[in-house]
């Protein structure tokens, strides 16, 4: 009886978990109808799950985040994260191709075991963040478990992540040729490297040495 009550308590606690939404400013269809039309078009082409929301950030990033609805990673909310610097730094064609790369990957998440592993890496990290910020005696067991398991899962799936990057690149070939796909990947990587290694460090040094 004691074990049954303990398991029931764990189940109830997991059902009550509410993971925080991804960071960024949410936008709706009335704000940018063209963007939503492009996203929905790619979702239909790739037969991907619905993109429930779009958020803009100030970072150079483009990804789809799957947020679990509770402590059981079975139902998700799919959020498209778009960094404003990405939209400013690359062409509309390259943006569409990179978007297709992520939407295509999302479509395969339901049928590929490796794709599920990739998304679960983020899920365990989200649970770890959730319990780390909730310091209480009743969540101690979950906090200890996810603080260990999230790191363990991240380390043991690194090889799968490297293989998955090649799969992601192939999804762009559903909407373009190989040359355009290579250009989009290269441009995104080069500009990200420039911003991370040159632009932002230089700007931060200037702000520090010449605050006025």
Image (tube, rainbow, N blue to C red):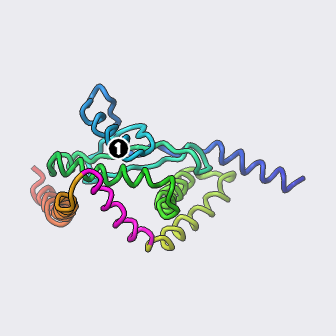
User: In the displayed structure, would residue 87 be above or below residue 115?
Assistant: above
Relative side of 27 to 158, left or right:
left
Residue drawn at (12%, 53%) of the image: 211
Find the residue positioned furthest to the right.
Answer: 1
Range of residues picked out in magenta: 160-175
Find the residue positioned furthest to the top.
Answer: 30
Q: Position of residue 129 (x, y in %)?
A: 50, 55
Q: Where is residue 53 in the image (x, y as percent from the top left)?
A: 39, 37
Q: Kindly identify which residue carries mark 1.
A: 45
Predominant SS along the magenta part: helix
**175, 53: nearer the viewer:** 175
Q: Can residue 201 be seen in this view?
A: no
Badge 1: few (under 14), some or many (20 or more) residues near its Cα, within 10 Å? Answer: some
Relative side of 144 to 97, left or right:
right
Residue drawn at (15%, 63%) of the image: 194
**139, 96: nearer the viewer:** 96
Relative side of 44 to 17, left or right:
left
Taking the magenta stretch, the answer to whether it contains residue 164 is: yes
Residue drawn at (37%, 42%) of the image: 43
Q: Is residue 55 visible?
A: yes
Q: Is mark 1 on a helix, strand or loop?
A: helix
């Amino acid at each position: 009886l004691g074990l049954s009550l303990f398991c029931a308590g764990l189940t109830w606690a997991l059902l009550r978990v509410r993971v925080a939404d991804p960071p960024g400013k949410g936008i709706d269809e009335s704000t940018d109808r063209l963007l939503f039309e492009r996203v929905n078009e790619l979702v239909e082409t790739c037969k991907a799950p619905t993109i429930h929301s779009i958020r803009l950030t100030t970072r150079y990033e483009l990804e789809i985040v799957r947020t679990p609805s509770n402590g059981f990673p079975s139902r998700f909310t799919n959020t498209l994260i778009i960094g404003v610097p990405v939209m400013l730094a690359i062409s509309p064609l390259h943006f569409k191709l990179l978007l297709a790369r992520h939407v295509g990957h999302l479509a395969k998440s339901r049928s590929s075991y490796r794709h599920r592993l990739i998304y679960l890496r983020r899920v365990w990290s989200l649970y770890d963040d959730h319990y780390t910020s909730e310091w209480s005696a009743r969540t101690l067991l979950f906090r200890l478990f996810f603080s260990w398991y999230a790191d363990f899962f991240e380390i043991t799936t690194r090889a799968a992540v490297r293989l998955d990057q090649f799969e992601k690149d192939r999804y762009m070939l559903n909407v373009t040729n190989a040359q355009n796909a290579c250009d989009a990947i290269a441009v995104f990587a080069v500009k990200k490297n420039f911003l991370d290694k040159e632009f932002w460090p230089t700007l931060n040094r200037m702000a520090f040495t010449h605050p006025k």
